[in-house]
Amino acid sequence: MSTNFSHTARVIRADQVTPLIKHFSFERVDGKPFSPFSAGSHVVIGMNNGTNTHKNPYSLVGSSNNFMEYEIAVRLDSTGRGGSLFMHNNIELGSEIEIGNPYNLFPVYKPAKKHLMIAGGVGITPFMTYIDEMNLMHSNFELHYSVRDFENGAFAKELQDKYPNQVNLYIQANGVMANFNEILDNQPLGTHVYVCGPQQMVADALRIADEMGWPNSSVHSEEFKAPEPGNPFTVTLAKSDCKINVRSRESLLEALENANIEIPYSCRGGACGFCKTEVIDGEITHRDYFLTDAEKASGNCIMPCISRAQGDHLTLNI
């Protein structure tokens, strides 16, 4: 996927579904249909604040059968780098944004005998399209959804009302916690489990699944990290001897893009591997999920969307 966006889109709905989550619907400005997508897909949204463009990945939450609209849900992160804050405070009915084509790193395994979904907080978003697709296919599915309280459970009432026998809600404020051992135990042969939510919840669910003997091929997860701030550093591009300064609250990928250096990407969250770039010199702070431990130890490649220099410089083979 290119760093260039595919479409200009207009906001046709903007609803505050919880105090922290806003639900947006978009249509293409040119009136044409969007590209088809499958359940679990995400898109990258571009938001220009006048000085730079935030580019954030969001799961599509609308029906995969509706090509005229794309829908996303954005959780406000007041301590983040400003993308979600901009969406909540500046994007409203009639606003225009840039949007990329959909890409799927978290697809449904359709031959599964049963689909077991475990969601936490805004991790419910990819499962909205899952459930829509599974319902149309008359698939056997079950959702376990943990929220801080009912008020902050995005789409919780909608899902419970529509699928009362398949949606299990855990409200932490009421002392009700999801027990992953119980959820994962005694599932029928051929079940696939999908996990999306906060980092610790995903890690706990995956660890317990592994301890219980679930095969890796039957366990799927998704989690995008936002780039964390760090010390500023300088990156040298070996093929052009160009030097670029990377600011403390700017990712390496963003710095390269601001210098008109095009790097392929999809997730912008350290999960997909598209932006993997060769490193010639410099120490790396790895923050991605994609590289193996051996690749990280070698120090010869970096995921510029999420990782950065450990010291004051890097040299890249571009």
Image (tube, rainbow, N blue to C red):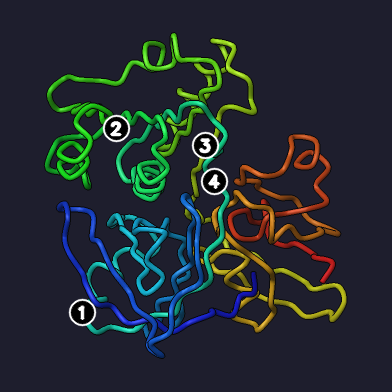
Q: Which residue is mark 4?
A: 107
Tag 1, which secondary structure? loop
User: In the figure, residue 238 lies in which quadrant?
Assistant: bottom right
- CB atoms at circles 2 and 4 under 8 Å apart? no
Sequence order check: which comes first, mark 4 or mark 1? Answer: 1
Q: Gap in Å between the C-alphas at discs 4 and 1?
A: 31 Å
In the rendered image, residue 239, in percent from the top left (x then y), is placed at 87, 76
Q: Which residue is mark 2?
A: 145
Q: Nearer the viewer, mark 4 or mark 3?
A: 4
User: In the figure, residue 313 lies in which quadrant?
Assistant: bottom right
20, above or below 180, in the image: below
Instruction: From the viewer's side, name the closer residue of 211 and 139.
Output: 139
Q: Which mark is residue 93?
A: 1
Instruction: From the viewer's side, name the closer residue of 147 and 29.
Output: 29
147, above or below 268, in the image: above
Q: Could one spot residue 68 in this view of the protein?
A: yes
For the residue carrying disc 4, how many other residues have a C-alpha within 10 Å: few (<14), some (14-19), or many (20+)? some
Q: Quadrant of the N terminus?
A: bottom right
**Amino acid type at image mark 1:** Leu
In the rendered image, residue 17, in percent from the top left (x then y), is placed at 17, 55
Q: Which mark is residue 221?
A: 3
Sequence order check: which comes first, mark 1 or mark 3? Answer: 1
